[in-house]
Image (cartoon, rainbow, N blue to C red):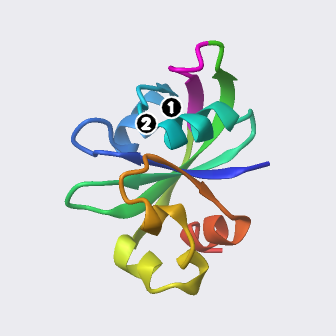
Amino acid sequence: MAYYLLKTEPTEYSFADLEHDQTTIWDGVSNPVALKNLRNMQAGDELVIYHTGDERQAVGTASVLKNDATDARNPRVQIKARRKLTAVTLAQMKSNKLFADSPLLRQGRLSVVPLTEAQYRFLCGR
């Protein structure tokens, strides 16, 4: 099992939207590194949904149902909402040594970020 953080602009598609829809297709990624991360996702992988923009915080969890990566330039990952989190802000992540080498902090514009299990557990409050 792998762990990822998915960034979204809450005015475009928020975690509340995902909760309402229950499932959605995550696609439309253009950054080559983010695309690679998206292509690597497999059913059962765990996700953290992160709101960008003015919020800058992890707000919920989801899981990968399936990944259609037949089009390498536009993989389509079906995800399912899991649970709302007690928000963890970017400032909290920056102050935690678990994220010292994280692409989340080093590559700010990366929209699909791999997480370690420890980072995932921290964001989930475990």
Residue at 30% x, 54% y is 52
* Residue underneath mark 1: 22
Q: What residue type is disc 2 on?
A: Leu
Q: Where residue 32 appears, x then y in whole percent?
A: 50, 36
Mark 1 neighbour class, 10 Å CA radius: few under 14, some 14 to 19, many 20 or more: some
Residue 33 placed where, x, y %? 53, 43
Residue type beneath disc 1: Gln
Which mark is drawn over residue 116? none
The residue at 57%/73% (across/down) is 101
Q: Is mark 1 on a helix, strand or loop?
A: loop
Query: Is residue 86 at least partly visible in the picture?
Result: no
Residue contact at pointers 1 and 2, CB within 8 angstroms? yes
Which residue extends farthest top?
70
Which residue is drawn at the image coordinates 23% and 55% (left, top)?
A: 53
- Residue 125 against residue 97 in the figure, above or below: above
Residue 17 horizontal side relative to residue 37, left or right: left
Residue 83 as seen in the image, left or right of residue 41: left
Q: Give the range drawn in magenta.
A: 71-80
Residue extending farthest to the front is 32
Residue 108 relative to residue 119: left or right:
left
Does residue 74 belong to the magenta stretch? yes
Residue 33 among magenta residues: no
Q: Which residue lies furthest to the right in this view?
A: 1
Residue indicated by mark 2: 18
